[in-house]
Amino acid sequence: MARLVCISNRLPMEAGPAGGLVVALSAALAESGGTWVGWSGATAATPSPALAPIDGGPFGRLAFDLTEAEVAGYYMGYANSVLWPILHSRADLMRIAHDELAVYKAVNRRLARMVLDVIAADDLLWVHDFHLLPLAWELRALGARNRVGLFLHTPFAAPHDMAALPNAGEVAEWLACHDLVGLQTEADVARARASLAAVAAARPGAGGQVVIGRRATRIAAFPVAIDVGEFAALAGAEYRRLPPGLVRPDRALMIGVDRLDYTKGLPQRFRALAAFLEAHEDWQGHVSLLQIAPPTREGLAAYDAIRDETEALAGHINGRFADITWSPLRYIHRPVARERLAGLHRAARAALVTPLMDGMNLVAKEYVAAQDAADPGVLVLSQFAGAAEQMADALLVNPHDIEQVAGAIHVALSMPVRDRRRRHERLFAGLLARDVHWWSAAFLGTLRGPRPEPPPA
Ligand code: ADP
């Protein structure tokens, strides 16, 4: 079998318990004797000229360092200040700087050269996410003919948003250099087709291919998933280790787990909690939301603003509703160990997963996997999370509609066990049918299949 080479912005450096993507790719990499290439997370005074091997772990790892200027232009700049907001329908938060776009391209060009030095002609390349959109274009320019697949973990931008990019046509050309572009949902595939048609005159080719200029690519949905058995086992074991007093029959626990990002809808969620407590006084003193939201991308204005806004709201809500023995909202700004999170999910009567826009949202799947099937909690899920396409048995909500979310909280907390079991059973079966092993096998199976054919000259 051809060797698999995964390339992502960050290389997993720890040998310890792994999250989403690492679990997803470890098995596939170990199976093919593969290698993972990514940024070490460290900065160096000068750009690294070659990839450096990292010892240990079940698969090969090759790391590169970035300079401070590269982190500013490539990572914090074009990737997180232009692409991330655009891909999440937030053109208003985009901060275009053409010199940062140049740095983003230069980092991808350097990475392409370093990758070319370590790959064989028949290696299969799997590129991950919006940090590395031009990598395949750069590899093709250097003569690489390998099969290259891209998986985009975010949503795909709608035509109106895509048009707001400073270089929409160029992004379309980058995408066309892949044999396969994997997206999270069928809605993303439809948006991609429409956006690429709008900005780059993309047209349908044979067998559902998308043709852009002289190149053809395939675009298909592969909803990213979790290792259900692993997370369920973790939850069962860790539930027993939770601090005494956390689970009380007279105090229902609700949970929210998100990076502190403006896409996650935290202010709307907090307002919905307040609206619920106001409408249902009998629940005051008997339910609280544990919101775990570690800061990310600190230093970018949009992230500083969401932190200020959520902190102010949390203070306001606690000030208004708390009494001397109870507060409605516990807001934690630190990362929590994965196993502890699993235990907390199992203890929670409801999870509030209410992003304004999200590629998939693995937390929704983790919450369902963590439940006790005999007495499961209820998932309140935004219709704008990619996960909603597969999880119709959650309580689906419009996160902008505060009254509706408040109503869903009430339904979740009051739901009879028979209904909870019925919903959970279907959700859990869905997770098992398409777990993380299905995900990587489906993507790689398609990438190994027939290559897209360029249009006749
Ligand atoms: P995103 O990729 O936008 O952060 P996802 O929900 O798809 O959102 O994935 C987040 C992953 O990170 C999940 O596996 C989740 O368990 C983990 N995670 C999120 N918040 C925390 C936290 N506070 N502490 C530890 N892990 C977290």
Image (cartoon, rainbow, N blue to C red):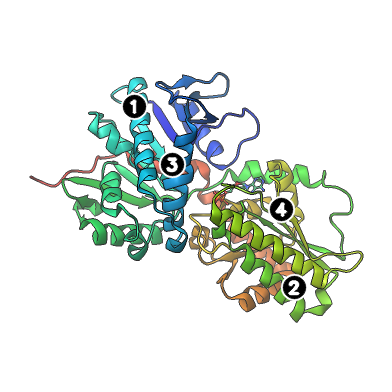
Is 82 situated above or below 349? Answer: above
In the rendered image, is residue 448 in sight?
A: no
User: Is residue 300 or residue 446 the one in the foreground?
Assistant: 300
Q: Position of residue 157 (x, y in %)?
A: 38, 59
In the rendered structure, which amino acid carries the disc numbered 3?
Gly
C-alpha separation, residue under disc 4 versus residue under disc 2: 18 Å
- The numbered disc on residue 345 is 4
The secondary structure type at the circle numbered 3 is helix
Q: Position of residue 370 (x, y in %)?
A: 68, 51
In the rendered structure, which amino acid carries the disc numbered 4?
His
Residue density around tag 2, few if under 14, some if 14–19, many if 20 or more, within 10 Å: few
C-alpha separation, residue under disc 3 versus residue under disc 4: 37 Å
The secondary structure type at the circle numbered 4 is helix
Mark 3 vs mark 2: which is more N-terminal?
Answer: 3
Instruction: Give the number of the mark in front: 4 or 2.
Output: 4
Question: On the image, numbered disc 2 is attached to which residue?
Answer: 414
C-alpha separation, residue under disc 3 versus residue under disc 1: 30 Å
Residue density around tag 3, few if under 14, some if 14–19, many if 20 or more, within 10 Å: many
Question: On the image, numbered disc 1 is attached to which residue?
Answer: 123
Q: Position of residue 424 (x, y in %)?
A: 64, 60
- The numbered disc on residue 73 is 3
Mark 3 vs mark 1: which is more N-terminal?
Answer: 3
